[in-house]
Image (tube, grey):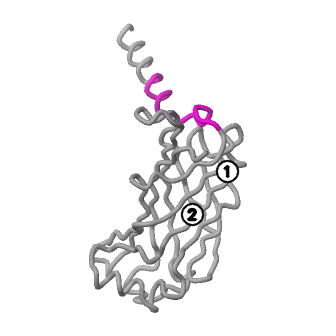
Amino acid sequence: MKIRVSLALAWLLASAVAVADLSAVPSGKYGLDKSHGYITFSYSHLGFSDPHIGFRSFELELDLDNEYPENSTVNVTIDATSIDSRLENFDGHLNGANFFDTANYPNITFNSTAIEMTGENTMNVTGDLTIKDTTKPVTLAATINKAGAHPRRNTPWIGVSAETKVARSDWGLTRGLPNVGDEVTIWISVELPKAD
């Protein structure tokens, strides 16, 4: 009986620690810790592999309402020219007119329009994703990994992960279809220190 009680208590304590309580940080604006920010995407290449490609440079601003998180807003601006496939020639191809055409459309943006809490530390963040002057709604399944004072910087800090799937053809990115997959999975992992 004691063992069962101890195990149950340990499980409850672990569960409590796992829940990210946004009340642990104040409302206000949070920016990106650029040394801990990642946006990557993947797709099927001829069915043989799933390349993972990222962006080296982007800005993210969270305006947090810690009491009513659904009233918060998120805005992201990606420098599309910073695309990084780890292959210089392919980066040039992705920057070219057949794909992101960064000479004419240097930025990709996401601006939230609604946030719906789906759990104590999970939410759906819906917003407008704009690529090459085409804007479509996208919903990110987001998780607050941790919220609290950074242990070394002693400032409010939030860690967030998010994921979604989109069809690249919705933004006119049709090169290589159907052999190169239309479905693209997008992953985001960021740390956000308080900005003001």
Q: Which residue is mark 1?
A: 116
On whether residue 179 falls in the magenta region, the answer is no
Q: Please name the residue shown 32% across and 71% down the image.
A: 50
94 relative to 130 in the view: left or right: left
The correct choice, above or below, for 147 with respect to 51 in the image is above
Q: Please name the residue shown 50% across and 33% down the image.
A: 149
Quadrant showing the N terminus: top left
Q: Which residues are magenta?
A: 12-26
On whether residue 21 falls in the magenta region, the answer is yes
9 relative to 169 in the view: left or right: left
The correct choice, above or below, for 196 with respect to 12 in the image is below
The percent position of residue 20, horizontal first and vertical second, equals 53, 36
The percent position of residue 8, horizontal first and vertical second, equals 43, 19
Which element carries disc 2, helix, strand or loop? strand
Q: Amino acid at mark 1?
A: Glu
Most prominent secondary structure in the magenta stretch? helix
First reached walking from the N terminus: tag 2 or tag 1 = 2
Nearer the observer: mark 2 or 1; the answer is 2
Quote the CA–CA distance across marks 2 and 1: 18 Å
Q: Residues within 10 Å of mark 1 (few under 14, many from 20)?
A: some
Q: Amino acid at mark 2?
A: Val
Q: Which residue is mark 2?
A: 76
